[in-house]
Amino acid sequence: MTHDDLLPLLQTTFGYPAFRPLQREIIAASLAGRDTFALLPTGGGKSLCFQLPALVRPGLTVVVSPLIALMKDQVDQLQAAGVAATFLNSSLGEAAARSRLAGLHRGEWRLLYVAPERLLLDGWQENLKAWNISALAIDEAHCVSEWGHDFRPEYRQLTRVRDLLPGVPVMALTATATDRVRADIITQLRLHEPAVFVASFNRPNLTYRVLPKDEPLRQITDFVHKRPDEGGIVYCATRATTERVAESLAKRGLPARAYHAGLTQTERSENQELFLRDEVRIICATIAFGMGINKPNVRWVIHHDLPKNLEGYYPETGRAGRDGLPADCLLLFSGGDAAKQTHFIDEMTDEHERNVARAQLRQMTHYAENAACRRRELLAYFGETFPLDHCGACDNCLEPRDTYDGTVVAQKFLSCVYRIHEAGRFGVGVNHITEVLTGADTEKIRRWGHARLSTYGIGKELARPQWAAVGRELMRLGHVAQSQGEFPVLELTDAGLAVLRTRQPVSLTRPMESPKARKTIRREGDIACDEILFARLRELRKKLADERRVPAYVIFGDATLRQMAREYPATEAAMPGMFGMGEKKRAEFGAIFAAAIRTFLEHNPRMKFTA
């Protein structure tokens, strides 16, 4: 089918005026019968890449998905748009499961969502052969790779399904994968000469910020109070922290619930459902929450603790702003969090895993402390070059940190590294360097005689964490290198030795501070509208959603409501062309929302908006 054939289907079913980047090309390759690999960022429209072809081609499209909540979520939205979709998983009772299986045998469904382990059950071979399966879509495909951040062994078994359905095209989709993980996905799933599509990782509607962690509950509370009508996710490193933060926020009058693997399935489902339906504004979660969550109006994501790596951090921030409207990502950083992560890494039994984890943590710490554009840093990690030096939507670009003449402190640090190596012909880690500089009295300093060094105690003007930050910046500048292995040690590079010998000036960046006031940012994706009408439409949407027992965004997303609150479509005839409003939704809800807008206009004037 041509673009001209597909576009009307996109508009009438899903209410979207145009395809997002690479969607049309991915769909065309799949409809041509090719295996495809698609890497689209969170919020980039992965699901549409297999949903739209399922409406075109005959037969059943099977979608492999790892999360029960995601299956129900997507099926609810598809059914609301008039698409014959269903799911099979352990949440269904026996009667409901039998009914859906019978419908599959009768060919009633176009899309079936299923967990990978169910496809591998005994007796399902006959089902798969009998259901006229015409396509297989594997969502969250990074789960197949041991190099990915969320490896799931059952995904490795999906090649058995390929053997059962040798002529069926396979589509593998993910939102986050380095070059190494991409290659591993293609190999492990045995994709045959796949069409490979990699979209930009840039999410222009997201603003990235890092703050030094200082009374985090107060910082989170202040952040949330400034966004009274918005909901978001607080990611925490441990189960205990999620519960403590959720309880503390609730005591402060902020509706919050915890989500982690230690809760019962009933508790997790209830808390997630409350969040999806906007009954609870805040979910405090471990990384167990979020993968594939389809809630489009998450307006912010806060990391209470330092993530282990950028590959996990990026998709977690990507839970925000999936609807394309502005959203904020805040990371609370402390060197203490990095030290905790290092302690956990040291307890790993596999040396290779330890080395990989240390390298990933260094990259994460570098991102948090670096004064350069955060967007550039994130995109560079995934092999993409951001074309601008200034993104206009991160703290370092909007409020650049001051630099200072760091020649003296750099000389002290580099000299201490040099003197220690000269005295003992061995290197030490950054913690020991800071202890020597600050004149500490430790067992190692006494044993190695480092109190006799000329650099012992010459850095008492700075605290040890400050010296550690200086050391990390000198590493970023290339003056010091850190070895790999269980006990990483510091060594001067040729550039660092030159700085030490020639006393050339060194410019360092001042540490992050918590500013009292921040600039107001107009971010890409803002839709100016009548905020009072928008609030009324949100109330109406919530009422309709509650009546149908579905999340509010299944009715309409925020972008649709904002367009209505901007253009005031007071009749159903004025509704065509509304973003996210397909024919079925317009027939079901158009008159209701038009009536609400008419009532509003009886007592309120229309506002005018510039483009």
Image (cartoon, grey):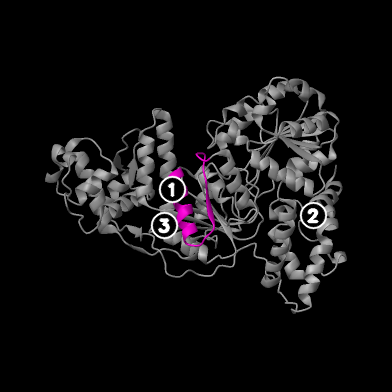
Taking the spot 77% from the left edge, 24% from the top edge, the residue there is 127
- Disc 3 secondary structure class: helix
Sequence-wise, which precedes: disc 1 or disc 3? Answer: 3
Q: Amino acid at mark 2?
A: Gly
Q: Is residue 592 above or below residue 140?
A: below
In this rendering, position of residue 150 left or right of residue 120: left
Among the 4 quarters of the image, the one containing residue 520: bottom right
**Tag 2–tag 1 contact (CB < 8 Å):** no
Q: Residues within 10 Å of mark 2 (few under 14, many from 20)?
A: many
Magenta residues span: 237-263
In this figure, which residue is indicated by the disc labeled 3? 216
Q: Most extreme residue toward the left, as rendered?
A: 452
Sequence-wise, which precedes: disc 2 or disc 3? Answer: 2
Q: Nearer the viewer, residue 203 or 240?
A: 240
Please identify, in this view, whether the residue under mark 2 or under mark 3 is nearer the observer: 3
In this figure, which residue is indicated by the disc labeled 2? 15
In this figure, which residue is indicated by the disc labeled 1? 241
**Tag 2–tag 3 contact (CB < 8 Å):** no
Sequence-wise, which precedes: disc 2 or disc 1? Answer: 2
Q: CA distance from mark 1 to mark 3?
A: 11 Å
As for residue 158 lying within the magenta part, the answer is no
